[in-house]
């Protein structure tokens, strides 16, 4: 049973611990499906995505408030509140921002909840790897179905069409039009040039032969 299948009345009485166990079981089933090469639903894919993004980027060095600090550190807001009461806890800046670097050092120095943070990061990395495997498999499947075109094929087609356009334009404006335009007034010349351009565009659009 997926978490989404649980009735609303039942979920209202579920504790965070039970909910976490349910999600863990769901995630284990998803990993099994990926290993077996089975397709994933949008809900299952979203669960992997959420787990992959559960730990913030280490490149963040300043948190704008306590909520962002808790997210970056991978703990709850209540946990951060408790840590702030400890001696030597980093003080916020004048603009109420928090140094993530100082807080991480404080956590290491005081051995605060290192196991959960490390485990969360490991699980997030595994989820990112799993997500990459899913995306690679989906791309391979799409290629087999003809939904994707190889970049080299696109380049070849583009080069061919550009060459065709140049050949048609040269044939029209260097060979066919000069004798036709001789002696015409400006309006008539403009009309003949426009017709030549329309003919070139129509030929290219229909995939016609570019041979003059």
Image (cartoon, rainbow, N blue to C red):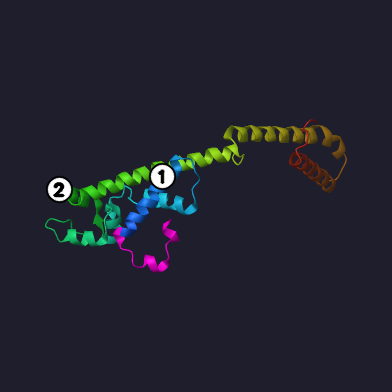
Q: Is residue 16 left or right of residue 113?
A: right
Check whether the beta carbons of the residues at disc 1 and disc 2 lie within 8 A of each other: no
Label at residue 77: none
Q: Quadrant of the C terminus?
A: top right
Q: Nearer the viewer, residue 201 or 112?
A: 112
Element on which disc 2 rests = helix
Percent of width and height locating residue 110: 14, 50
Label at residue 31: 1
Whole-number angstrom distance, CA of label 1 to CA of label 2: 36 Å
Residue highlighted by disc 2: 109
* In the image, residue 157 above or below residue 89: above
Q: Is residue 107 left or right of residue 72?
A: left
Percent of width and height locating residue 23: 37, 54
Give the mark count: 2
Seen as rendered, the residue at the extreme left is 87
Element on which disc 1 rests = helix
Percent of width and height locating residue 122: 30, 44
Q: Nearer the viewer, residue 2 or 200?
A: 2
Residue 53 visible: no
Percent of width and height locating residue 169: 75, 36
Residue 60 visible: yes
Q: Nearer the viewer, mark 1 or mark 2?
A: 1
Q: Is residue 179 left or right of residue 204?
A: right
Magenta stretch, residue numbers: 1-17
- Of the image marks 1 and 2, the number of the one nearer the N terminus: 1
Q: Nearer the viewer, residue 54 or 174?
A: 54
For residue 133: magenta? no
């Amino acid at each position: 049973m997926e978490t989404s299948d649980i009735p609303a009345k039942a979920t209202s009485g579920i504790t965070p611990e039970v909910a976490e166990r349910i999600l863990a079981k769901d995630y284990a089933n998803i990993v099994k499906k990926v290993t077996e090469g089975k397709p994933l639903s949008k809900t299952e894919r979203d669960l992997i995505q959420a787990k992959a993004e559960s730990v913030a980027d280490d490149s963040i060095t300043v948190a704008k408030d306590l909520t962002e600090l808790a997210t970056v550190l991978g703990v709850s807001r209540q946990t951060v509140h408790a840590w702030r009461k400890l001696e030597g806890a980093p003080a916020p800046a004048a603009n109420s921002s928090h140094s993530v670097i100082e807080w991480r050092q404080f956590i290491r120095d005081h051995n605060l909840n290192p196991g959960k943070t490390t485990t969360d990061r490991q699980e997030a990395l595994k989820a990112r790897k799993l997500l990459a495997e899913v995306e690679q498999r989906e791309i391979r499947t799409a290629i087999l179905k003809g939904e994707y075109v190889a970049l080299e094929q696109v380049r070849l087609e583009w080069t061919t069409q550009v060459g065709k356009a140049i050949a048609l334009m040269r044939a029209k404006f260097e060979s066919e039009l000069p004798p036709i335009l001789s002696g015409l007034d400006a309006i008539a010349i403009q009309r003949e040039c426009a017709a030549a351009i329309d003919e070139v565009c129509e030929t290219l659009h229909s995939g016609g032969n570019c041979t003059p």
